[in-house]
Amino acid sequence: MRYLIAAAAALTLAACNQPAETPATTEAAPVEVNAPTGAYTLDPNHSSVTVTAQHFGLANYTLRFNKLSGTLNFNAETPTQSTIQAVVDVTSLDTPYTGPRDFDSELQNSSWLDSAGFTSATFTSTAVESTGPNTARVTGDLTLRGQTHPITLDVTYDGSHSPHPLGMQVSSIGFSARGTFNRSQYGVNELLPSAGGNDGVSDEVTLIIEAEFTRPIESAPVPGNTTAEPVN
């Protein structure tokens, strides 16, 4: 009996001396941002806006807009307070169609983009919600064909530099974004499929954005006259 008591006591002491388990953490490390707070301009040469729609249930047909502009008011300390405005020239539509028809021009007509009356589409952010260390949900107003409706974009922060790695004296920051909307909300009703069918072009359109923004690096302030006055 004494041996049993001694063994039980030894096991109890051993258990008490075991190091406490460290609780697993799911909190991701913060993401480093190398761009300062300020107003940035969209770099149209390194940015793109494409849209895709299901084409008769066969594949996602892709269109691209080649002319865009925008501004980002970036808050490096509190990114959710950042705002963005973007403008897309809808007359810059570019499709992969190579047939005898001028398909790009056809999509500019009143049944589709109606670019004669509405030459541009705009997006203005209204709220930014953080969803992860380098992701956010950006809500805003999308205006197309003169009609405005809310849209939500899932945005990923890709990276930033200040200055640019090639030596250019600019701060730069880049994002990828993706969202969907129904084209019928904006009066684009041509070739809508029947309910549950694949006999047309889908109402739901996917918007894909790759955007780089830049701003000049502000020069250091010129120091004042630091020469001491002579002492008499």
Image: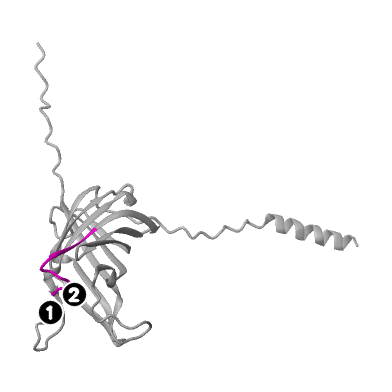
Q: What secondary structure characterizes most of the magenta part?
A: loop
Residue at figure coordinates x 16%, y 48% from the top left: 217
Rendering quarter of residue 224 = top left
Is-magenta flag for residue 121? Answer: yes
Q: How is the image coloured?
A: one colour
Position in image of residue 156 (x %, y %): 32, 63
Residue at figure coordinates x 18%, y 59% from the top left: 165
Tag 2 secondary structure: loop
Which stretch did the figure color magenta? 109-123
- Position of residue 116 in the picture relative to residue 173 (left or right): left
First in sequence: mark 1 or mark 2?
Answer: 1
Which one is nearer the viewer's eye here, 43 or 113?
113
Residue at figure coordinates x 17%, y 71% from the top left: 113
- Position of residue 50 in the picture relative to residue 103 (left or right): right
Residue highlighted by disc 1: 106
The C terminus appears in which quarter of the rendering? top left
**Discs 1, 2 touching: Cβ within 8 Å:** yes
Position in image of residue 66 (x %, y %): 13, 70
> Which amino acid lies under the numbered mark 2 shown in the image of this protein?
Trp
> Which amino acid lies under the numbered mark 1 shown in the image of this protein?
Glu
- Position of residue 98 in the picture relative to residue 18 (left or right): left
The N terminus appears in which quarter of the rendering? bottom right
Residue furthest out toward the right:
1
Rendering quarter of residue 52 = bottom left
Whether 33 is drawn above or below 104: the answer is above
Residue highlighted by disc 2: 112
Real-space CA distance between mark 1 and mark 2, rounded to the nearest whole angstrom: 8 Å
Is-magenta flag for residue 28? Answer: no
